Amino acid sequence: MAIMMSGRKGVTGASSGGSKRTRAKLDLGYGDDDDELDDEDEDSEDEGESSEEESEEEETVDAKRLRLAKDYLGKIEAQDSSDSDGSSAATDSDTDDKVGKRILKERLKSTGLLQTCIAESVSRGIQEMKATIEASDSAEELAKSWIDKKYVTYHRGHDLTPTCVALSREGHHAFSGSKDGSLIMWDVEEGRKMTTILSSKRADNQSQYARNERELLALAASDDGRYLATAGRDKCVRVFDIRTLGNTDTASPVTIFEGHKKAVTALAFRSRTMDLYSGSEDRCIRRYDLG
């Protein structure tokens, strides 16, 4: 009882004296915890702000992509609408179909898989030229008429029959190979021989080849007008740099590819690439990267 009464008096004295000593002791017990809670709240707020900034950046990138896509589609639609001026008004479905075809064409063109049908237009042009030629039962007179109209030109330079021809992408230069192993570069506009890349009379180190082994069977020119590939019965594929042809008396290949076991009969460059393909009588197709 004495102990309990003294405790009551202590409390009563504290309250009566106006001192806040006891309450201060109770408050000090929670001070550190409050600071830790405040720090945790600040950290969580910082993390929330950083996550919001990152989400804003991601949204900004997505918005930019969306804007660029809309601009691209707008340009395509504007071009299609300008092409269709003067014609009947097109429906929304027709416009969407044109835009889809245009996008598909651009994608195929960028990947080098675009195919263009030109046979009909070429055939139509030939028919128009035929209409200006007088009919004749004689093949010689008919051929002379084509030459007089300058629809056909003859170029001489090979000793034996030409076996393959290639045209540059711009159409300014033509290349022809022959059974005698010669390779000639022509100026299409002027109709003249520019240079003999390979002569029918080979050097001494190539005299071991027989005439039929020197025969050229395939030619191919790259789209960028840089390389010319040749192949024949010697089972090799030779690549020349067109830009240096004609600067020297003798032309040397940039590289020579070997690997086929029989005559190489076909060459082709993949559109808009430096990929070269060769086909041979050994029933193999080989790919070469000239990039």
Image: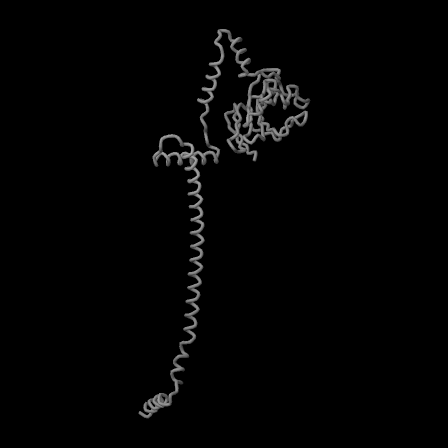
Q: Quadrant of the N terminus?
A: bottom left
- The number of discs equals 0
Determine whether 201 is above or below 37 in the image.
Answer: above
Determine whether 21 is above or below 40 in the image.
Answer: below
Depth order, front residue of 270/225: 225
Expressed as whole percent of the image width and height from the top left, the position of residue 3 reads: 34, 91
Q: Quadrant of the C terminus?
A: top right
Q: Does residue 35 appear left or right of residue 233 in this picture?
A: left
Depth order, front residue of 99/245: 99
Look at the image and tell me whether residue 260 can be seen: no
Look at the image and tell me whether residue 179 can be seen: yes
Expressed as whole percent of the image width and height from the top left, the position of residue 234 reads: 59, 23
Determine whether 203 is above or below 61 in the image.
Answer: above
Which residue sits furthest top? 137
Colour scheme employed for the rendering of this structure: one colour
Which residue sits furthest left? 1
Which residue sits furthest bottom? 2
Image-quadrant location for residue 108: top left
Expressed as whole percent of the image width and height from the top left, the position of residue 112 reads: 48, 33
Seen at 46% across and 14% down, the residue is: 131
Determine whether 207 is above or below 9 in the image.
Answer: above
Image-quadrant location for residue 222: top right
Q: Does residue 236 appear left or right of residue 130 in this picture?
A: right
Seen at 45% across and 44% down, the residue is: 68
Expressed as whole percent of the image width and height from the top left, the position of residue 2 reads: 33, 93
